[in-house]
């Protein structure tokens, strides 16, 4: 396992370049919600159109979803559809696996589990994740049973640990870790403590900091962050751990 840190002015731009690389190989990409991933998706679309590449052989998955109706502004898929899928529609129809959050947390998790199992399950090429100020990632919140789930690939999360307080569905730690590369996109000083707790020197896997639970299980983790998010890390001793 290797954790690499990259402090960049625009984490979204760096993530978009990683997405392009994975797409060029017809890869399996797990998408995240949030403002920084949204910016990455827009830049990915621009890059794909600039080079004239057809990403129809790329398969997209969602890392998590909120249990709301289709079209709801809280839906991660709604954001992904707006920033990624619709802009690509004039050149390609990517293979997208949606979490049907409108079914409710457990039925939607069961449905997504079936999709994943029917696909192999896939060995993801690139997993994009965020990290919350509380250390959560995807919809895996501190000290909840979902953080310790090891037999399933997708799990229902009846109670969110952070706003918006709606039920969720999330990929589990084993599913997220089964990737060639896991990339955390982090911006802003509000995330600095969480980044240090999850990945800083001396940090250990801790259910109270769900992001840290990926460290011993993932093959490779890259933390893409701006200077504010990196403020609590001691990077003078090297960029990897």
Image (spheres, grey):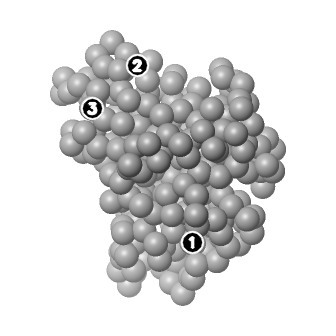
In terms of image quadrants, where is residue 195?
A: bottom right
Q: Residue at x 53, y 43 (%)?
A: 114
In terms of image quadrants, where is residue 53?
A: top left
Q: Which residue is mark 1?
A: 213
Q: Quadrant of the N terminus?
A: bottom left
Q: Quadrant of the C terminus?
A: bottom left
* Local crowd size for mark 3, using a 10 Å CA cut-off: few (<14), some (14–19), many (≥20): some
- How much space separates mark 3 and mark 1, taking CA atoms? 31 Å
Q: Which element type, helix, strand or loop, lies under badge 1? A: helix
Observer-nearest residue: 16 or 56?
56
Q: Earlier in the sequence, mark 2 or mark 3?
A: 3
* Local crowd size for mark 2, using a 10 Å CA cut-off: few (<14), some (14–19), many (≥20): some
Q: Which element type, helix, strand or loop, lies under badge 3? A: helix
| Closer to the eye: label 2 or 1 | 1
When the figure is inspected, residue 134 is found, relative to residue 53, above or below; the finding is below
Q: Residue 193: percent from the left, percent from the top?
A: 64, 69
Q: Which residue is mark 3?
A: 57
Q: Which residue is mark 2?
A: 87
Q: Going by the image, does 173 lie left or right of 54? A: right
When the figure is inspected, residue 157 is found, relative to residue 149, above or below; the finding is above
Q: Residue 226: percent from the left, percent from the top?
A: 47, 56
Q: Going by the image, does 188 lie left or right of 215? A: right
Observer-nearest residue: 8 or 128?
128
* Local crowd size for mark 1, using a 10 Å CA cut-off: few (<14), some (14–19), many (≥20): many
In terms of image quadrants, where is residue 34?
A: top right
Q: Residue at x 66, y 38 (%)?
A: 108
| Closer to the eye: label 2 or 3 | 3
- How much space separates mark 2 and mark 1, taking CA atoms? 35 Å
Q: Residue 227: percent from the left, percent from the top?
A: 48, 60
């Amino acid at each position: 396992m290797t954790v690499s840190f990259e402090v960049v002015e625009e984490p979204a731009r760096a993530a978009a370049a990683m997405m392009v690389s994975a797409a060029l190989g017809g890869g399996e990409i797990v998408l995240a919600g949030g403002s920084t991933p949204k910016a990455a998706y827009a830049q990915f679309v621009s890059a794909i159109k600039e080079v004239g590449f057809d990403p129809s052989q790329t398969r997209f998955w969602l890392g998590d979803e909120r249990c709301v109706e289709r079209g709801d502004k809280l839906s991660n898929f709604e954001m992904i559809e707006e920033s990624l899928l619709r802009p690509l529609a004039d050149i390609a129809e990517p293979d997208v696996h949606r979490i049907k959050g409108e079914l409710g947390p457990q039925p939607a998790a069961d449905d997504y589990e079936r999709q994943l199992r029917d696909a192999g399950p896939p060995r993801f090429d690139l997993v994009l994740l965020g990290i919350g100020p509380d250390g959560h990632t995807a919809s895996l919140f501190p000290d909840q049973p979902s953080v310790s789930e090891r037999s399933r690939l997708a799990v229902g999360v009846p109670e969110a640990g952070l706003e918006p307080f709606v039920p969720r569905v999330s990929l589990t730690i084993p599913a997220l870790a089964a990737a060639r590369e896991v990339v955390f996109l982090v911006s802003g000083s509000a995330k600095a403590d969480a980044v240090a707790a999850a990945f800083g020197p001396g940090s250990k896997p801790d259910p109270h900091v769900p992001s840290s639970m990926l460290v011993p299980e993932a093959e490779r983790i890259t933390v893409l962050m701006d200077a504010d998010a990196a403020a609590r890390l001691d990077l003078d001793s090297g960029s990897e751990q």
